[in-house]
């Protein structure tokens, strides 16, 4: 069974359509979206041509069997994360002024100063985003796999803090063991390629193919949004236990599909 994973679309409908074409060409059985479908910092908007939040939501709804919510999605629909620790959001967080949120946040959480909710979002889009869970545990070939936008205890990526070493993974790996998941996947980090992390290492993986290591390992997936050569997607073959990290850019040739390799 082949599973396509997309993440961090940030309203980039053109890159999303390219990614969906690749997944279709590779005959993926299912597609999962790991959040941040909408919302983007306007500092980086020059890289996203004709952003369209509503079209991105509709494309995810039609093509993804499963999806989870990300921090930018939450901000766009003015929703406070649920399974979260590290900061106590007041119930009227989004009604507070920026100056108040800066003071209350104490540099711990994203404030989205350069971001406003997209005017293209429709009521049905907001309803869909609001329905998305913060994480999913799914079973493939008898193995539990956990999917989220970021890692526990910040599953939505709402904290400014980001993991950079094995010690930062401790709580998340414990969370996975609690859910009997041998491995897990998230987005949020926008890595060049992919990052594989466990209790012993935090390793960058370039755009290529790898054996899927399931011994309590976590994989940070690339972003779909046009992002200075970092854009990409992942395909997991649960039958062969292989993962392909595919680069997504203007030079991507859909006729040049990847081939699984046996390392």
Image (cartoon, rainbow, N blue to C red):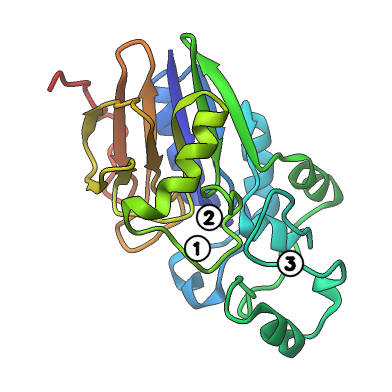
As rendered, which of 102 and 191 lies closer to the eye? 102
12 or 197: which is nearer to us? 197
The quarter in which the C terminus is drawn is top left
Q: Is residue 238 above or below residue 250?
A: above
Of all residues, the one furthest to the bottom in this rendering is 99
Mark 3 element type: loop
Residue to which mark 1 is pinned: 49
Q: Residue at x 38, y 40 (%)?
A: 219
Left or right: 106, with 253 as reference point: right
Q: Which residue is mark 2?
A: 12
Residue 19 placed where, x, y %? 44, 39
Name the N-terminal-most of marks 2 and 1.
Answer: 2
Q: Is residue 130 left or right of residue 51?
A: right
Image disc number at residue 88? 3
Q: How many marks?
A: 3
Gap in angstroms between the C-alphas marked 2 and 1: 7 Å
| Res 132 visible | yes
* Of labels 1 and 3, the one closer to you: 3
Is there a contact, CB below 8 Å, between mark 2 and mark 1? yes
Distance between the Cα atoms at labels 3 and 2? 32 Å
- SS at mark 1? loop
Q: Position of residue 86 (x, y in %)?
A: 62, 63
């Amino acid at each position: 069974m082949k599973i396509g994973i997309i993440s961090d679309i940030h309203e980039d409908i053109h890159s999303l359509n390219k990614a969906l074409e690749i997944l279709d060409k590779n005959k993926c059985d299912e597609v999962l979206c790991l959040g941040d479908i909408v919302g983007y910092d306007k500092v980086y908007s020059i890289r996203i041509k004709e952003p369209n939040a509503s079209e991105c939501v509709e494309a995810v709804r039609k093509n993804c069997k499963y999806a989870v919510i990300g921090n930018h999605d939450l901000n766009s629909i003015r929703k406070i994360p649920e399974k979260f620790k590290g900061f106590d959001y007041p119930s009227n967080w989004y009604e507070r002024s920026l100056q108040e949120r800066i003071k209350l946040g104490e540099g711990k959480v994203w404030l989205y100063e350069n971001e406003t909710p997209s005017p293209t979002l429709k009521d049905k889009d907001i309803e869909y985003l609001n329905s998305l869970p913060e994480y999913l545990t799914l079973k493939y070939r008898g193995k539990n796999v956990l999917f989220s936008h970021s890692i526990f205890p910040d599953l939505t990526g709402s904290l400014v803090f980001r993991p950079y070493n094995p010690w930062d993974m401790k709580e998340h790996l414990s969370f996975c063991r609690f859910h009997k998941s041998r491995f897990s996947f998230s987005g949020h980090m926008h890595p060049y390629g992919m990052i594989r992390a466990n209790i012993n290492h935090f390793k960058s993986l370039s755009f290529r193919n790898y054996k899927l290591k399931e011994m309590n390992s976590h994989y940070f997936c690339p972003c779909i949004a046009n992002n200075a050569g970092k854009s990409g997607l992942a395909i997991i073959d649960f039958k062969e236990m292989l993962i392909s990290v595919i680069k997504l850019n203007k030079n991507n040739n859909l006729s040049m599909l990847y081939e699984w390799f046996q390392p």
